[in-house]
Amino acid sequence: MRKAPALPLLPWPRPAAHDPAVAPMLRLRRWLRIGAGSSLIALIMVCLAWEGWLAPLKPEGSLLILKAVPLLLPLFGILKGRRYTYQWASMFILLYFTEGSVRAWADRGVSAKLAMVEVMLSLIFFTCAIFYARLNRNPRA
């Protein structure tokens, strides 16, 4: 008689995905990951388009286009679902929220509208990130 392969030891018991009590939680985690990842990618695109050609500070463009580069740092950790990345990126994104709210107040026209888009995307990312990090924490012993 063949022995079944040993299962790896986990630090806590993982619930079965087919458990009716757990399925909504797994669905929520998936949607939070999708929301965080898509809002981060959209924020990168908005920053590039905003400072590149839609409403740059100078007509020939400005170095503010480089503000999209720091958003690439948490991108792969967010897409892979790493809890630690969600934790620090949720605090990091508040810089973009602040910049967007200041420019929404101070700028006019297209730039103010793009600033409001930046504020909304950073709020969506922040909300998804903090709830994902909370749902992915280790259960307390």
Image (cartoon, rainbow, N blue to C red):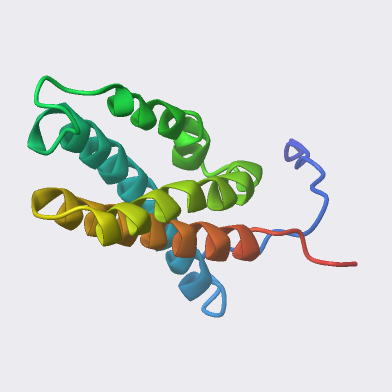
Q: Tell me the residue at 31%/48% (across/down).
A: 38
Relative horizontal placement of residue 75, taking residue 77 as reference (left or right)? left
Residue 85, by quadrant, is: top right
Foreground of the two, 15 or 117: 117
Residue 56, by quadrant, is: top left
Q: Tell me the residue at 46%/30% (across/down).
A: 70
Relative horizontal placement of residue 4, taking residue 30 as reference (left or right)? right
User: Can you see residue 35?
Assistant: no
Would you place residue 66 above or below residue 97 in this image? above
Foreground of the two, 139 or 36: 36
**Residue 128's x, y, as percent?**
46, 61
Relative horizontal placement of residue 123, taking residue 9 as reference (left or right)? left
**Residue 74's x, y, as percent?**
50, 35
Q: Tell me the residue at 42%/48% (across/down).
A: 96
The quarter of the rendered structure image containing the C terminus is bottom right
**Residue 39's x, y, as percent?**
32, 51
User: Can you see residue 122?
Assistant: yes
Residue 125, by quadrant, is: bottom left
Q: Tell me the residue at 51%/57% (across/down).
A: 129
**Residue 13's x, y, as percent?**
76, 59
